[in-house]
Structure formats: C-alpha cells, structure tokens
Amino acid sequence: PDSVWTAKMKDEDELFLFNASQEVFGDFSKEKTDLTELFKHVKYYFPKFSPPRIITILSNVDYENKVIYADSLMFISLDVYLGQGHKVYEDYPVYIKQNFNPDHMLIDVAEQLAMPVIKPNPLKSYISRIVQEGKKKYMMSAFLPKTVASDILGYTTEQYDWAASSESSIWKYFIQKEMLYSSDPTLTERFISDAPFSKFYLEVDKDSPGRIGVWFGWQIVNSYMRNNDISIQEMLVVDNEELFTKSKYKPKKR
C-alpha cells in the first residue's frame, strides 16, 4: 500500500541517507560521464552490448548488493559510496568500508558487467577458482584502462605492494601445501572471499590483505595473455586449469 512508501519517505534514517547521497553525488553528472565512457569500452570488446538503464537507489547500506545488473537495468545503491570516513559507517569493519567511496562505484559496475561475459568453469580446484577471479579482474581492467591495479582489486597501495613483494613466498606456500589442485572448499574463505586478512595460519596473516588468491589469479591471467597469441574473447572461454598450464606463470623474485 501507498502508506508503506509514504512512511519510508518520512523516515528519519531514510531522509538522512537521501540527503547524504545528494550531498555527495548531486545531479550525478560526473558519474553519468564516467559510466558512458565505461560503456563505450564494454561495447568495444562486445559490440552487441546495450548499455543498461541506470537507476540509483538507497538500500540501507546493503554492501553485499551494491550494484545489481539485470538484463536492461542496473541498480546502484548510492548509500554505499558516501566515503569510508562517513559517520553512517562508523561501526563497520575497516575491510568492509575500505571501498565505500564514490570512485569505487565505477569499479563495482565494471565487475557486474564483466561477470556475464566469462564462461562458467568447473570450480572444484583452488587454481580454477582463482583463475576465474583473475579473468574477471582482467576484464575489469580492460573496461577501465585508466584505473590502477590496486583500485581494481579494492586494495590500498600498501596492500598491493605487500602482495607484490610477497609473491614468491606465498606461491611457494601454496605449492608446498599442495593447494593448487585441492578441492578443499575452505580455501575460498581463506584466500578468495572478502576478509580483513588472508588466512595462512602464520604470523604473516596480520600483515596480509584479504583475497590474496584473487591477486594471484589476475597475475596468472596476465601471464597467459603475455605468453599466448589470443584475444580477450577467446581467453574468456578457455578452461581455467588449461589456462594456468599454458600461462607459464612464475612469481617474480623481488
């Protein structure tokens, strides 16, 4: 009934979020320009792509569904991008609110646009799971060529630098623990899912960023694209384990 929506429009919390989003985004003109540019890049790689109609909403900070892409529509929750220091996020863990910034909206949109173009793969092995994530990050970086790698990953510069400097030792750990072809589902939670840190169960945990497996998946796909004469569209349908084998990936010694 209309009374539900009328009450929502008068609710103090709803009004606070609405006014806060208006202060940050105004008429949404900058975002419109950025989204238009993003859609041009998507169309370059996928000529049949039709830009979705954008609808901005308030979701009561539903950070697990910041952007929803459904057919011809895309819903963007503005109240998840007010700036990580905004008082509405005071009680949120740092690793959750780290990317609650206006600039990260475009990255989340690019992620939603990248997901449908990647062929589903059997994700039983750990290596297949991280390569699938790597394909997504590679595609996002193609859609956003001016965006730095750390932002694509949702890392701070310090977190990205830690991952790069630790590349060789972490890869050695994965191999020694025989993780690459393991079907252990807990590896997703330890190294792929959002978390304050990656879970090696070592002293190094406290220094590590979460989702380190995603970082490695992206390095593997980068290596594959360097070592194989293949288009992005062709790469997206290659079996993940086959891609890893042909990537000739070797961690950089720093």
Image (cartoon, grey):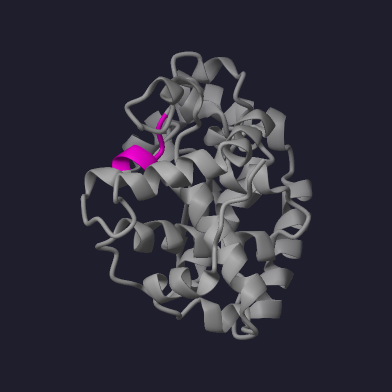
The stretch of residues the image draws in magenta is 189-195
Q: Residue 233: say if magenta.
A: no
Q: Quadrant of the N terminus?
A: top left
**For this view, does 5 lie left or right of residue 229?**
left
Is 4 displayed left or right of 110 in the figure? left
Q: Residue at x 60, y 65 (%)?
A: 223
The answer to which quarter of the image holds residue 38 is: bottom right
Give residue 45's position: percent from left, percent from top. 66, 78
Q: Is residue 174 above or below residue 228?
A: above
Location of residue 14 in the rendering, given as x and y in whole percent from the top left corner: 47, 27
Q: Which residue is at a point 52% across and 19% down the rendered structure image?
A: 88
Q: Quadrant of the C terminus?
A: top right
Tell me if residue 117 comes above or below residue 159 in the rendering.
below
Q: Note whether 168 is above or below 15 in the view shown.
A: below
The number of callouts visible is 0
- Visible residue check, residue 105: yes
* Quarter occupied by residue 138: bottom right
Q: Nearer the viewer, residue 203 or 59?
A: 203
